[in-house]
Amino acid sequence: MTSVDEKQLIEMLSNPATQRKAFEQVVRQYSEPLYWQVRRIVLSHEDANDVMQNVMLKAWMNLDTFRNASKLSTWLYRIAINESLDFVRHQKSTSMVSADDENGIANTLLADKYFDGDETEAQLQEAIAQLPDVQRTVFNLRYYDEMKYSEMSKVLNTSEGALKASYHIAVKKISDFFKQHD
């Protein structure tokens, strides 16, 4: 089945007779971009797969709460980001490993067989991981997904000005990280 536009998908999702087929299409169309958004937050392939299962389950279970006030993709991104951040918070609260371990995240990524980046990308991920949740999310959406601030404000439910400030601060912190690790 080829890609279906959002309006048609929303119509199919609201009809009990076509809802399951429409959701299968949602999974096909949105799994990959959502996976990469989740992966940039949780870093590990296995963790990203676990979070994605939760994202799709939550989306399926809450289809009736989708109000069509925003785009379907915006709603799905919001679920994915919230699930990812919840996962990271839970990991931090139960982890025995210090987030300050020198090159801990970079070394972990370089050892991950699913990580296809180089050492610089691993260090970038380490720098991003040290950002507060909001700055990390804004940076990932803007830098990797090239999401416009207007769309991001709908996903994150905040003003464009606050998002621009968060992105600017995140870029500065990442730049400082690279200067310290040069």
Image (tube, helix red, strand yellow):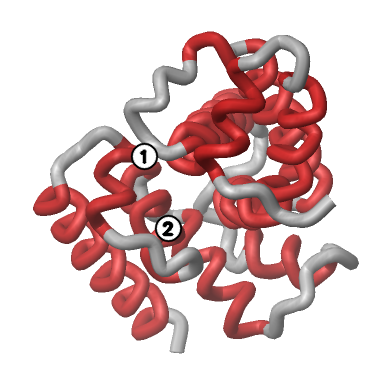
Residue drawn at (65%, 26%) of the image:
12
Q: Nearer the viewer, mark 2 or mark 1?
A: 1
Residue drawn at (36%, 71%) of the image:
174
Residue drawn at (77%, 13%) of the image:
17
Foreground residue, 54 or 102? 54
> Disc 1 marks which amino acid?
Val
Residue 40: x, y in percent?
Answer: 59, 56
Q: In the rendered structure, are the residues bearing label 2 and label 1 in contact, judged by CB atoms less than 8 Å apart?
A: yes
Q: For residue 176, what is the image quadrant?
A: bottom left
Q: Which residue is mark 1?
A: 155
- SS at badge 2: helix
Label drawn at residue 141 = 2
Label drawn at residue 133 = none
Q: For residue 54, what is the image quadrant?
A: top right
Q: For residue 126, what is the image quadrant?
A: bottom right
Crowdedness of circle 1 by 10 Å Cα count: few (<14), some, many (20+)? many
Mark-to-mark CA distance, 2 and 1: 10 Å
Residue 4: x, y in percent?
Answer: 66, 48
Q: Is residue 100 above or below residue 127?
A: above
